[in-house]
Amino acid sequence: MSDLTSLVASENALVQEAALALPHSFDKCTHEKGPIRQAVHLCLTCGIPRGLCSACSVSCHGDHEQIELFPKRAFVCDCPTIVNVTGCTLHKGPIAGNEANTYGQNFDAKFCRCHRPYDAKRERETMIQCVFCEDWYHESCLNLRTRPNERPSTPQQAAPESDSQDVGDVDSNASNDLPPPLLSSGTYDSFICGACVLSNDTLKRWAGTRGIMMVYASAKDEVKAPVGVEEGGIDPKWKVLDGDDELSSLDVGSEIEERKRELQTEPGDSADARPVKKLRTKDGCETVVADDTASPPCLAPPLNSVAQSVLAVVATTLKRQTSSDDAASEFVGQGDIFLTEGWRERWCRCSACLPSLQQHPFLLEEEETYVPPEDPDSGMSLEDLGMRALLNLPRDRALDGIRAYNAMRDELISYLRPFAQEGRIVREEDVRGFFEAKVEEAKN
């Protein structure tokens, strides 16, 4: 129950909330832009494993049940293609399908290595996006916490969700009823799953070194979860491997720079000690000069033996896919890595390390993600939008609209006057009743 003042304030608050939630213009499909990294949505109502751009998710499927898959790279909107039976309201006629798009398990509404469907009403865990494959993973599946029970299916009983969620790494305390995870979101910048680590030589080489953290099991005799761990808490058998015991003193950038200086100023380092090449002068004599075009020295840190052992077990598991191997991989770790801030600048650029990084440019430079243009009308109230529309009408129709507005205003004032005179509170149902009566009057 609320009075008229609180009702108006609530209406204004809803307008501002909508402007913050949807500040962009959604009147143009991104299909014509070709393959770009953009937010992708899955329409559950249509039931087709294809993706929608933000504009089509609002303009064409606004009344459908959807799941936001967040950014996907090199993706073209599927809404205007022939596979979408409902048709696209932002594009003329159906066009051929997007054969270049990649459709992983997310487009079947399944996520993580556990392949669980996502239910926002029941999910309590934080999910983290792999920067490489762009799939989403539960913290418990990354061994950052024990798996908590799901929320009750009744929405009224579910704990409220936090509204502070960032793409790629949702805040670990988004569910206030869970304890902190083994690695909080402020400890690392990006995450890459174990399967993706195994697919890239440089990632494998750096896994478990300083700034490229890995979670692993420290005690092989503790196969069962220990007694006394609170729901969603940290299983003490899981440890963080980062090439340094003190996580708080991590300064990887300085370490890399120091290594560069050591290589440049080692005792006896001179033009004669560096790679050389022979040049023949005009008089036929040969001279020896330093070869400045030679590949830079490798700055990769020494292999971490524990991380390499974990990756070896994971590789065997992925190849054989047997129940015993699955149990072993789940026990020692999954080979996932957590990269600290500035990780793209720290890679070695030598001839051995660089090629596998260049195959995936997002490992060297942060990608640009398409954002729809701002909507200049997003912060305007319904009254402001109505007045602007009225001013754009032909003069005779505008005058008719003003007369109708004034007539309704006078009737509403007459309707509300008794409330003011008697000191009664104007309830929401009172206002609704007035307008419902006007609708019935217009019908008759």
Image (cartoon, rainbow, N blue to C red):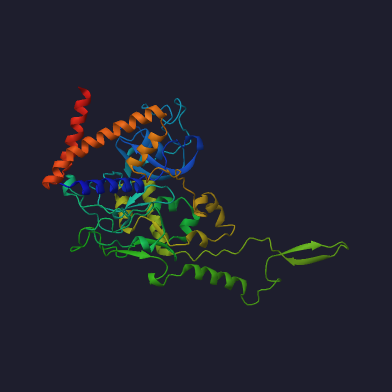
Q: Residue furthest right?
A: 283
Left or right: 287, with 301 as reference point:
right
At which x and y percent is residue 10? 25, 47
Left or right: 39, with 147 as reference point:
right
Left or right: 98, with 123 as reference point:
right
Q: Quadrant of residue 148?
A: bottom left
Image quarter (top left, top right, bottom left or bottom right) of the C terminus = top left
Q: Nearer the viewer, residue 254 or 426?
A: 426
Q: Judge whether 57 appears above or below 347 on screen.
A: above
Work out whether residue 247 can be spotted: yes
Work out whether residue 52 can be spotted: no
Q: Residue at x 48, y 36 (%)?
A: 100
Tag count: 0
Q: Residue furthest top?
A: 444
At which x and y percent is residue 17? 31, 48
At which x and y percent is residue 296? 61, 63
At which x and y percent is residue 360? 51, 49
